[in-house]
Image (tube, coloured by chain):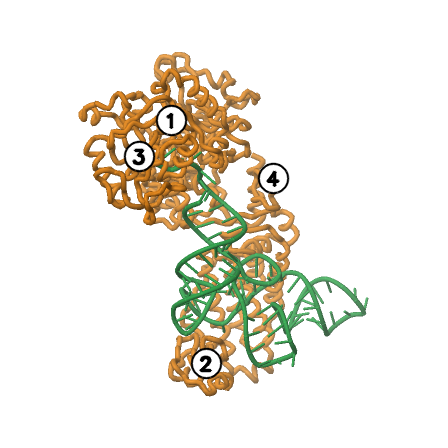
Amino acid sequence: MQNIENMRRQLRSIGAIYDWNREVITCLPDYYEWTQWFFLKLYQVGLAYRGKAPVNWCPRCQTVLANEQVLAGGFCERCGTAVIRRDLEQWFFRITKYADELMQHNGIDWPERIKIMQRNWVGKSEGTEISFARAQFQDMSDAEKLSRPSFERLHAGVEEKEIRVFTTRPDTIFGVTFMVLAPEHPLVVKLTSPEKKAEVEDYIARSRRLSEIERQSTEREKDGVFIGAYAVNRLNGESVPIWIADYVLMSYGTGAVMGVPAHDERDFAFAKKYHLPIKVVIAPPWWQGEELEAAYTEPGTMVNSGQFNRFPSQQGIEAVSDFLQKKGWGKRAVSYRLRDWLISRQRYWGAPIPIIYCPKCGLVPVPEQDLPVLLPENAEFKPTGESPLKYCEEFVNTTCPRCSSPAKRETDTMDTFMCSSWYFLRYASPHCDTAPFDANKLKYWLPIDLYTGGAEHAVMHLFYARFFIKALRDMGLVDFGEPFSRLFNQGVIIVERQKMSKSRGNVITPDEYVSELGADAVRAYLMFVAPWEQGGEWDDSGISGISRWLNRVWNLMLEPYELNPKAVEAKLGDEKAHRDLLRITHQTIRKVTNDLEKLRFNTMIAALMEFTNYLAKVKEAEVVIDSAWRESIDTLLLLLAPTAPHLAEELWQRTGHDYSIHNQSWPQWDEELAKDEEITLVIQVNGKLRDRITVPVSITEAEAKKLALESQRVKAYLEGKELLKTIYVPGRLVNLVVR
RNA sequence: GCCGGGGUGGCGGAAUUGGCAGACGCAGCGGACUUAAAAUCCGCCGGAGUAAUCCUUGUGGGUUCGAGUCCCACCCCCGGCACCA
């Protein structure tokens, strides 16, 4: 709560404007009650389920983590400790049900790279699932084969008569010379021959001991063990040995692959190591029948493939799949890299999962009217490796809502990303106490027009929130499927080669800068140093420039403007000064408005600085009448208000206006007034700049060319040359091509 | 390895998307004011050259009247994914 207070103070100190009435605090019961309510809704429609799976466990945080929260190389997102794999019974959200939709970003304006990251994270690949017969079951009838359950059922009721693999390259099936199962594959135990049993068990034990980082390292040499059994490639009747190897992942596809060493790099390395045959079935364009030095993974022409010889790979993939499908030996299938979202946490912080375990009724959801399930105040934090809730008797012990017999509460809490998956809905009606949100208010406010946040949330918060909203939409709770219509990533500030962040403790607080130079200077400097989406190394050396600029603005407005009487006499007939001032004012409004909409704050401020410098010259010249002057400085203040709200407000009042500048409407520009009267026309000879001339915008092509040829500087370059061509770009240049 | 995004003065960065490279600012240099300093103001500020002029957007090629911008090859930096069959 102190953190929150400190953040509030800092946000206020830099002049950030929020409607504090709408503040929500996700760790308080009046919020997490509704997080739990959503959990129950997801449970009701089967999107929340409890299951046993190998999960990521952080030994330091003493909790499990979702895949998205494990950093590259297998480190905990919060504390950086290497995670390990554990088989645990945990709660999941069925995010995979939305895999296809999460890859689409229809009708939303998001940075391309975020969309790509999300698509890659889902990792859809279309291929074919192929059944290999076990050697002694190859006589199975077609009818029997067709009735086989698909691979979802494979893991539950182990089938011994076949081995299913997933491949994106069915065109290489005649090149299969071995099979590889993941060590955890349920068939391994059943298939292993008695004489290989010890060796196989030893290998399984060894791969279990490996940390996830070691196991997933691509550097490591692939190894494996022959299990003493064979599988039959139904297309050519060949028997191939079955191996286990930990480069095959149980969690992807069917947990088994066909080994095609000639056309897969991993299989190639494996075959070389264990002297397994390498059979070329896709001919590279240059191929003369020689042995391959490395796996050929590109498309080619099918050879040694029976009836499919001479098919190009692409066609072969289709033809082989069709054939397998017709025979009942396989079917087209889609695999995703994405796994279900593991939401259980063994931390105290987080909303308790509202589930009760009753010895009679089994798993019972907490009835809605009993929410919230409160976190106990008196939980003890012990280094036991288990949630503190587990030892909190008064929390754990309860009665079954159905049969009233003594029962136990679930002690896992929810991933905090669950809280952040819907907080923006709560903003629409933050005090609603009968529902998570008021549906009418939601209609008005949502979806969010512009969401800014860091790119590091691409496959975490931003991904979860999209899933969450889609699930709510399908339950009829909201009428839109995308939470954030436009997404903008602000850059990350780097300090001492590390990202500035709370967890790294290298945060440079705005406080000292604010007290020294003022909030406006700090804000403006952050906007000015770099493109907003870029971030960069923190460097305060340029902040003085901003400070000086704001001081110039101050002096410009407060030192009285006086029209020089002599200048009036001499120049009042000179309307040009006024037209110029008006034009530049309107050009500045246009530039600042457009930049602001695109969140290009750095160039917006550059434009404001240029305008300030120009106004200083105007003031020096003392030739424009007072009303024109006033109008221009008012415009500058209005344009400056979002950047330097305090200064703009102060000057607004000191220049005789009423409170508040922040309630004024944004200045509009007039395209006519913003039009240039004169332009600089560039004159090139053979594409090289030779002269510039100032001409009226209305100049015709003929006039421009005439002026170009008359230029003294240009004439020297045309001497004795033949003019071949003249290029005229209106408003830009004349290019004389000579030889 | 694969997929993104980049490489522009001493520095942060501009450049209407193929048309004046270096806007705006920092740092630096020179000057004014001042007893002096700070602050402020004025001027200069990519490189070479006395100059005219030439060179210059990671490197090398190409397309074009014209390339920082488009195409091909390569080098380097950052981010993401990584035994995903």
Residue named by callout 4: A505
Please, what is the three-letter code of the amino acid marked with disc 3?
Met
* Distance (Cα) linking label 4 and label 2: 59 Å
If the image is split into quadrants, where does the C terminus of chain A sit?
bottom left
Tell me the element at label 3.
loop
* Distance (Cα) linking label 2 and label 3: 66 Å
Residue at image position (51%, 49%) is: A491
* Residue A10 x, y percent position in the rendering: 58, 45
Q: Nearer the viewer, mark 4 or mark 3?
A: 4
* Distance (Cα) linking label 1 and label 3: 46 Å
For the residues tagged 4 and 2, is the chain the same? yes
* Distance (Cα) linking label 1 and label 4: 49 Å
* Residue A13 x, y percent position in the rendering: 58, 48
Q: Which label was assigned to residue A695?
A: 2
Tell me the element at label 1.
strand
Q: On the rendered structure, is B57 left or right of A130?
A: right
* Colour given to chain B in the rendered image: green
Q: Earlier in the sequence, mark 4 or mark 2?
A: 4
Colour orange belongs to chain: A
Please, what is the three-letter code of the amino acid marked with disc 1?
Trp
* Distance (Cα) linking label 1 and label 2: 81 Å
* Residue A143 x, y percent position in the rendering: 18, 25
Please, what is the three-letter code of the amino acid marked with disc 4?
Gly
Residue named by callout 3: A475
Q: Are marks 4 and 3 in contact (CB under 8 Å)?
A: no
Q: Nearer the viewer, mark 1 or mark 3?
A: 1
For the residues tagged 1 and 4, is the chain the same? yes
